[in-house]
Amino acid sequence: MATQPERIILTYDDYRQLPEDGNRYELYEGEIEVTPASGSRHQRVVGNLDWALESHVRPRNLGTVLFAPLDVLLSETTVVQPDILFVAREREGTIGERYVGGPPDLVVEVLSPTTRHRDRVIKRQLYARFGVPHLWMLDPDQRRFQAFNLVEGGYQLSVEGQADETVSAAPFPDLTIRLGEVWA
């Protein structure tokens, strides 16, 4: 009878030893996940949304908007790199030089063919488990925006928009996002 190999649980210290080779590494409950560098379309969507968020957050002194690659240390064995994240001003002490220690107030994932399942299923479950209150998912292929709020340990869809619609979502209910400008 064959025995199962012993599962090795990696920690943040192990994770920090990974090579800087252009891949994006994350640590999901002790197991390494790797994603190739994103493409130009993905980068444009991230950049456009980042600009909209920064233009809203910075003048109002609401907190800090950051983008990948930046580690978010949810636990010693779970490290993620959301495409964009927001930490409210009163929690900015969680932002360190190398990582954000604990759940951000908002994480944004821009889906791509290589990350769609991982972002929609695995990372969404991790974000909920570790208490990220707001999750936005943008699908450039379908030109769809979805905002979720954490309710009783799971995410509920709160806002959905497509194509050239305009959306507003927590944690920025007074921010209007023109999706046509995000997809441009």
Image (cartoon, rainbow, N blue to C red):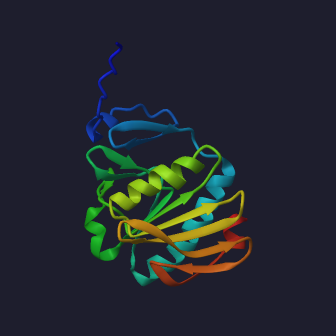
Q: Is residue 69 left or right of residue 94?
A: right
Residue located farthest toward the top when viewing the structure as drawn: 1
Which quarter of the figure has residue 104? bottom left
Q: Residue at x 28, y 76 (%)?
A: 90
Q: Is residue 59 left or right of residue 161?
A: left
Which quarter of the figure has residue 18? top left
Residue located farthest toward the front when viewing the structure as drawn: 1
Residue 139 in view? yes
Q: Which one is nearer the viewer's eye here, 51 or 178? A: 178
Q: Residue at x 32, y 52 (%)?
A: 73
Q: How many marks?
A: 0
Q: Position of residue 70 (x, y in %)?
A: 41, 52
Is 153 above or below relative to 43?
Answer: below
Is 108 above or below relative to 78?
Answer: below
Q: Which one is nearer the viewer's eye here, 125 or 85? A: 125
Q: Residue at x 49, y 37 (%)?
A: 34
Q: Position of residue 5 (x, y in %)?
A: 33, 21
Quadrant assignment for the C terminus: bottom right
Q: Is residue 79 left or right of residue 155?
A: left
Residue 16 in view? no
Residue located farthest toward the bottom when viewing the structure as drawn: 174
Q: Which one is nearer the viewer's eye here, 28 or 59? A: 28
Quadrant assignment for the N terminus: top left
Q: Position of residue 31 (x, y in %)?
A: 37, 36
Q: Position of residue 86 (x, y in %)?
A: 42, 67
